[in-house]
Amino acid sequence: MGRDIIEFRGIAPLTVDQLIVAVNEVLASRGVNLFSKRTLRYYTTQGIVPSPMGSPKFARYGYEHILCLVGARAMQDMGRKIDQIRPEVQEVHRGRFDRIEKVVTDWSENDAAARNRSLAAHEYREEFDETRTKLVKMATMVGRIPLSPYAMLEIGDCPDVGAEIKKALKELTKIAEQF
């Protein structure tokens, strides 16, 4: 997982390249598009990110720049537009980091929960595929179906076994479509 935003609080001023690397480090684990210098310029012109410290040739960026960039991305993922984000990040421009840090932390936690749900669905899908394969094999077997290491079902013992297996496959398919 990428670094937590608060880990960057005590960093010394950064060059533009170091800023982009730091922001992308935070975003990398969230699976979102990474920032570029062009995105930084856009956010600066839109008033989302404060201007850098120093002259253009020696521009330096601090924690507030990282926080504004990651915070803006978090709020965009929450459905907010630039005009709605601008007033939120103004607090960072005034030295109040707590509100945007909370937004970023909540976004990270929600994103982690979504990844966990997605992972669980993927694991379920693999289990479903494995079970379906076994059922198909059973349906096409002639003669015997193993029920356990100690019991076998003879096709002759249950004339509707093919129909029951087909019914089970349909039910499994319905359940799998929910994922």
Image (cartoon, helix red, strand yellow):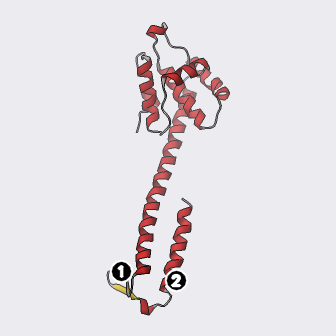
Question: Which of the 4 image quarters holds residue 79?
Answer: top right
The structure residue drawn at horizontal position 53% and vertical position 26%, both measured from the top left corner, is: 69
Secondary structure of the residue carrying tag 1 is: strand
- Pick whichever of labels 2 and 1 is earlier in the sequence: 1
Where's the N terminus, which quadrant? top left
Q: Residue furthest left?
A: 149
Please indicate, yes or no, whether residue 111 appears anywhere in the rendered image. yes
Which residue corresponds to mark 2? 163
In this view, the mark in front (2 or 1):
2
- CA distance separating discs 2 and 1: 20 Å
Marker disc for residue 54: none
Label 1 environment density (alpha carbons within 10 Å; few <14, some 14–19, many ≥20): few
Amino acid marked by disc 2: Ala
Q: Position of residue 161 (x, y in %)?
A: 48, 85
User: Seen in the image, is 166 located left or right of residue 146?
Assistant: right
Q: Position of residue 121 (x, y in %)?
A: 49, 57
Which residue corresponds to mark 1? 148
Question: Which of the 4 image quarters holds residue 90?
Answer: top right
Secondary structure of the residue carrying tag 2 is: helix
Q: Residue furthest top?
A: 55
Q: Position of residue 35 (x, y in %)?
A: 49, 28
Where 31 sits versus 174, above or below?
Answer: above
Q: Nearer the viewer, residue 64 or 122?
A: 122
Where 172 sits versus 151, above or below?
Answer: above
